[in-house]
Image (spheres, rainbow, N blue to C red):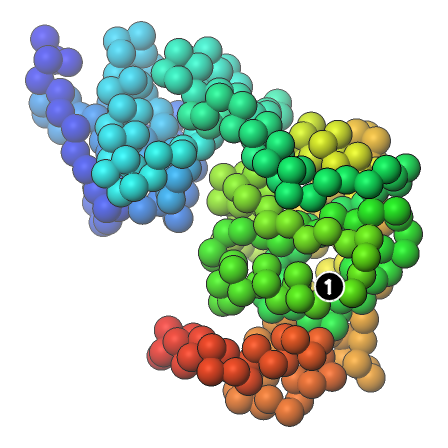
Amino acid sequence: MELANSYLEEGFPFRGRKRKKMEQFLEKSGLTYDAQIIYSVLLCKGDGEIIGCGSRHENILKCIAVDETYQGEGLLQRIVTQLIKQAYTCGIPHLFLFTKPKYRVVFEDMGFYPITETDTMLLLENRKDGISHYLKEELAKFPLPPCKDAGAIVMNANPFTRGHRYLIETAAQACDVLHVFVLSADASEFPADVRLRLVREGCRDLENVMVHGSSEYLISHATFPDYFLKDKAGASDKAAELDLKIFADYFRDAFHIKKRFVGEEPFSPVTRAYNKQMKQTLPACGIEVVEIPRKTCGDTIISATLVREKFLAGHMESLRPLVPDNTYRYLVSQEGIALRKQLLERQS
């Protein structure tokens, strides 16, 4: 009878006391509230007590839980159905879902398909063989020449610097074919399409380098959300492990990758923690991790952070030794000037 009086309550997201109650409910279920959530739904009894909840950030469903007392009553499906319905109204048909491995069968019955899992995390999507279809389409764009030793780099390139170019040049000399995956998530100062374009233009003369967009299957909000939390002191080892396992399970065989190259990371704690996890995870999967020292300009380590600082400060001439010619042309173009204005307005 109590369940007959239950109701769903939406938050975009919840704030104040309601959010606090949701955080406490999640804590009882062994989950942590995610600060990136943009939409939540609570399932409550008639007296307002929370007996279930679920949330969404972009196209990722997460923080889903049901009170143990009411499990098996179909409440989970009710919550997930509402999350899917609301995502569809926002024009988001392709969904990912984070949960614990023990709930695999439950979500498979709701039309979700496993991508990969660790001992504590399971990632699913609502497209059957979605990642396999993506890889097939990507391979069709870049027919692979016969090679014994393919390598890979995954980079944000926010924006593309001489440091990135040095990393790619050095790695390209150490393998037959080098695949460069530029992060597709629009969560950086420079838009994803601009970052991808600058890398492609900046590597056009390197014959054995193939530049790809990374899609949602490499360091995205779906596979590694902690990467995009700028205020985190460090990355979640478990989230990093999940992302790296996708790379090992799918990208390694599809692109015949035997080496993954990374630059030394003296600045970002999140990237440094991710690189540390990479060295623990990938070698066990048959992928060698090769760390390359950062390129310097005099005594200064070249970084995208430094380039962004000078760009926003309007010190255009000082950018010349830090970025390739094609990046510099973009930064001083009308398109670049418009982006700078937009970023400065965002800061004010």
Residue 268's place in the image compared with 210, above or below, is: below
Name the residue: 33% across, 14% down.
68
Residue at disc 1, secondary structure: loop
Residue 10's place in the image compared with 116, above or below, is: below
* Residue 20 visible somewhere in the drawing: no
Local crowd at mark 1 within 10 Å, few (<14), some, or many (≥20)?
few
Query: In the image, 88: left or right of 331?
Result: left
Quadrant of the rendering where the C terminus is positioned: bottom left
Q: Position of residue 187 (x, y in %)?
A: 47, 57
Name the residue: 63% across, 75% down.
327
User: Would you name the residue on which mark 1 appears?
Assistant: 204
Q: Position of residue 29 (x, y in %)?
A: 39, 25
Q: Quadrant of residue 150?
A: top right
Query: In the image, 316: left or right of 247?
Result: left
Q: Position of residue 306 (x, y in %)?
A: 64, 76
Quadrant of the rendering where the N terminus is positioned: top left
Name the residue: 52% across, 83% down.
333
**Total marks drawn?**
1
Residue 244's place in the image compared with 46, above or below, is: below
Name the residue: 56% across, 80% down.
331
* Residue 169 visible somewhere in the drawing: yes
Q: Amino acid at mark 1?
A: Arg
Q: Quadrant of residue 5?
A: top left
Q: Position of residue 343 (x, y in %)?
A: 43, 75
Q: Quadrant of residue 345?
A: bottom left
Residue 190's place in the image compared with 347, above or below, is: above
